Amino acid sequence: MKPVSRRLYAIAAIVLAAIIFVAINIAANTGLTAAKLDLTQNGQFTLAPGTKHIIAGLQEPVTLRFFYSKKVAADYAQIDAYAKRVRDLMEEYAARSDGKIIIQEVDPEPFTPAEDEASANGLTGAPTDSGVSVYFGLVATNTVGDKEAVPFFAAEREPYLEYDLSSLIYRLSNPKKPKIAILSSLALDGGGMQAMMQGGAAQPNMIYAQLQQSYDTQMLDPGFTAIPRDVDVLLIAQPAPLNAQQSLAIDQFVMGGGRALVFVDPNSEMVSAAGGSTGEPAVSDLPQLLKGWGVVYNPQKVLADRELAQQVQTSNDPRNATARYPIWLHLNAANFDRNDQVTSSLQALNLASAGAISPVKGATTTFTPLISSSDQADLLDAAQVRATPRPQDLWNLIHPAGSPYTIAARISGPAKSAFPQMAKIKDTKAINVIVVADSDIFDDRFWVHTQDLFGKRVASPFADNAAFVLNAVENLTGSSDLISLRTRASSDRPFTVVKQMQAEAQAQYQQEADALQARLADTEQQLHALEQGQAANGQNSKALTPAQKDEIERFKRDLIDTRAQLRDVQARLRSDIDALGSVLAFINIALVPILVAIFALVLAFIRRRRRARAVSA
């Protein structure tokens, strides 16, 4: 019997590999296997603990009617691929629900009762070139008739698909919404002075809109005298000055076991941008309440941070169009308390003109920082910040303290009333309050892009501002199931080395710029004196003395030299960053293939040597 040749072995192996490859793809596409491998850093394609807990806690069935125009959408690859992910995720929910989640797929073909049902439930069809609409939405119901809907699965919301589905199921399984009372001078609900000036109601703030979706919200009247008894959480955002009776009402609400989320601000840019009714800088404070809770807050100090400064456009000069603005902060994972549920999953926050808070010495409450600055921060006078619009000038005012400042903190533990003579509840009580020294966290400009899709506003967040507020409210109401879901789609991976290089170059550039400004001012003063002297003596420019001409020439040479130095600084910054980029590109593109090739060559060499030894033996 002849031995089988190596060539025949190789051909058989290739054929077998091809058969296995095709079989695996068929199995995957036909749903014969649910196995998957999620290699994303934040487990984007693995169910979050909150989702699993929501599904496990279902007490009654929830029906998900998935309306999808399968035949019409087959010509649109992006929608078809997204629909497969929606379907797969719902099936995974159902598989974990022990029969509590029921999936029904409906193809609303044109001019059918299914299309009428989709339209009647608020679903929106996307028009196509053929004139036929594509329906791609969801209607969910529970056994008592409550209904929730996703009018259209917009591609912009795909990173938040699990959150959208889980929150929908959560609302159906918990139909009684916690009640939130909101006290604010901001036009969160779209009303207020700004809306009146525009001749009608403006769009509600996006964070407020999301709060309305999950909670029973009530805006407190500015003249309130008491907090309603059925309120679970009191949200205070940029409050107007309160009288003694109003402050006492808040104090007694918190002392009576109520939870509070408080946002104060030394310089609210959201109010300034809306043109505050008083025209004065927007400053907010709750002096007696904060002191009673064990919090120190100075409403006249704005936090500036060199390391967390956002890049903003400052000129039309393409060579130097942007600068880092140290009072607009971009915070990342390193600035959040990873042990608190409110901040443990946050990736990025954008704040503007924030303040700082600290604990009162000897306070009975526990002060736990939730959000902190870097150690390259300093507190600047708010009035000076308002009078200094140029980023480079603010940059020069910063003298880093060498330790971080606290922007937000949880205040818990035993406390006494801040108004002992007026309070009904005077004994020491345990409180739970979260205080944030910024209200611009609510400003849509800083965290979300919105667009109108079939008459509905679709939000595409680029920071976790809303997630922080919603996490805090949910945590204070005693629930935490959705917290782990809100920030999974956010992936803020800052180039820390590049940012550090930019910060160092910015500091060096600022020193050069300051020196140039000083030279310019000095020379302009000297030229002004020369011009005055000429005018007094009736001289013209041709009558300048040699010393005066030398002085002007020296100024021109200094100006040219200083500009050259500035260009050198910028060139060095750019070359260092480009060099770093080249190294990273080499590692990502070339290094791995080179290592694989080296491994293959070494392996081939080892095999050759083994064969040679076998033959010689």
Image (spheres, grey):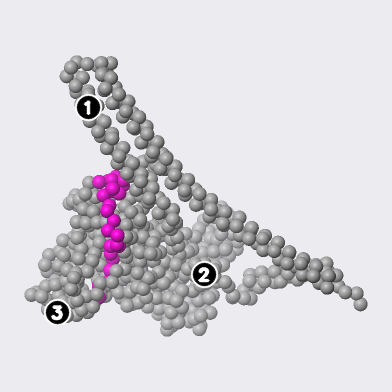
Residue 398 counted in the magenta span? yes
Span shown in magenta: 388-412
Q: Label 1 neighbourhood size at 10 Å, few (<14), some (14-19), many (20+)?
A: few
Q: Which residue is mark 1?
A: 528
- The tag earlier along the polypeptide, 2 or 3, is 2
Confirm whether residue 189 shows in the render: no
**Rendered residue at 57%/71% (across/down):** 37
Residue 213 lies in what quarter of the image? bottom left
- Return the residue found at the far front: 617
Residue 254 lies in what quarter of the image? bottom left
Instruction: Judge by depth and name the residue closer to the eye, 247 or 290.
Output: 290
x and y percent of residue 597 in the render?
67, 60
Mark 1 or 3: the one toward you: 1
**Relative horizontal placement of residue 267, taking residue 592 as reference (left or right):** left
Q: Label 3 neighbourhood size at 10 Å, few (<14), some (14-19), many (20+)?
A: some
Under circle 2, the secondary element is loop
- The tag earlier along the polypeptide, 2 or 1, is 2
Q: Which residue is mark 3?
A: 425
Give me the C-alpha separation between circle 2 and circle 3.
50 Å
x and y percent of residue 384 in the render?
21, 49
Q: Which residue is mark 2?
A: 45
